[in-house]
Image (tube, rainbow, N blue to C red):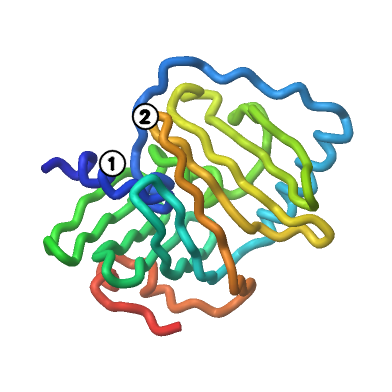
């Protein structure tokens, strides 16, 4: 089985966030944004750029069921997902590449980070400028939702970020894969500005399970 097929079968939002996705059939249209929308998107971008390190627990909802685990982020460029048992998966982004480790099969696959949807969240700086298309931006029930695709690859899938308002806090993301399947990750127990061991995001440290 190829690594990309393994990614597809996992149906994990974190996994889709960190795996290349193929072309969709139709180019999404930009959302009509007001001047106020543009100002609010600038505030969201400023909030995201203020996140340098982050840890959280996540719960994932996909067509194959519910799973959970922990995530560590060190911007720019670095992220690590540890799935709780029985999932054997660890995902690691080290600023250049993404490593997908299946502990059950003892196999590691490698991808270029720039080719994955995670690049939007891990790049520095984050902005909603010409290199992305905002296809949705709305408010409901105390939450703001923004959906983006890459301008250079508008058919290559979408990433939706959900924020609680007052104060603005990242709470959820949703990735739509090349087959139109939707997978959502909810974040809880978020901590920002924490000291993280750089080895968490090094390929050589992939085989060590971090202690939280």
Local SS, label 1: helix
Image position, residue 102 (x, y; %): 20, 60
Local SS, label 2: loop
Q: In this view, does 57 lie above or below 2?
A: below
Residue displayed at 40% across by 84% down:
211
User: Is residue 130 left or right of 60 when viewed as pictured?
Assistant: right
Residue at the outermost bottom position: 211
Image position, residue 39 (x, y; %): 84, 39
Which mark identifies residue 8? 1
- Label 2 or label 1, whichever comes before in sequence order: 1
Which mark identifies residue 18? none
User: Is residue 24 left or right of 85 when viewed as pictured?
Assistant: right
Quadrant where the N terminus sits is top left
Q: Mark 2 points at which residue?
A: 179
Q: Is residue 151 above or below residue 198?
A: above
Image position, residue 22 (x, y; %): 34, 28
Most foreground residue, 123 or 139: 139
Most foreground residue, 147 or 182: 182
Residue at the outermost top position: 26
Q: Distance between the residues labelled 2 and 1?
A: 9 Å
Quadrant where the C terminus sits is bottom left
Residue displayed at 59% across by 78% down:
194
User: Is residue 122 left or right of 23 when viewed as pictured?
Assistant: right
Residue displayed at 34% across by 49% down:
64
Q: Pointer 2 and pointer 1: residues touching (CB < 8 Å)?
A: yes
Image position, residue 37 (x, y; %): 82, 35
Most foreground residue, 198 or 16: 16
């Amino acid at each position: 089985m190829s690594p990309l097929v393994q990614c597809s079968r996992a149906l994990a939002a974190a996994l889709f966030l960190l795996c290349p996705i193929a072309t969709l059939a139709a180019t999404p249209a930009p959302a009509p944004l007001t001047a106020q929308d543009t100002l609010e998107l600038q505030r969201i971008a400023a909030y995201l750029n203020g996140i340098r390190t982050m840890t959280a627990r996540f719960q994932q909802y996909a067509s194959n069921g519910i799973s959970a685990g922990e995530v560590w982020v060190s911007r720019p460029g670095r992220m690590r997902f540890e799935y709780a048992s029985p999932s054997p998966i660890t995902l690691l982004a080290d600023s250049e590449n993404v490593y997908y480790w299946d502990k059950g099969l003892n196999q590691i696959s490698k991808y270029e980070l720039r080719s994955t949807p995670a690049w939007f969240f891990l790049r520095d700086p984050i902005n909603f400028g010409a290199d992305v298309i905002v296809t949705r931006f709305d408010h409901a029930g105390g939450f703001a939702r923004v959906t983006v695709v890459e301008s250079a690859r508008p058919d290559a899938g979408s990433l939706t970020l959900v924020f609680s308002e007052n104060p603005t806090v990242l709470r959820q993301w949703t990735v739509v894969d090349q087959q139109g399947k939707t997978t959502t990750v909810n974040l809880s127990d978020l901590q920002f500005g924490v000291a993280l061991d750089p080895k968490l995001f090094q390929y050589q440290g992939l085989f060590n399970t971090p202690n939280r």
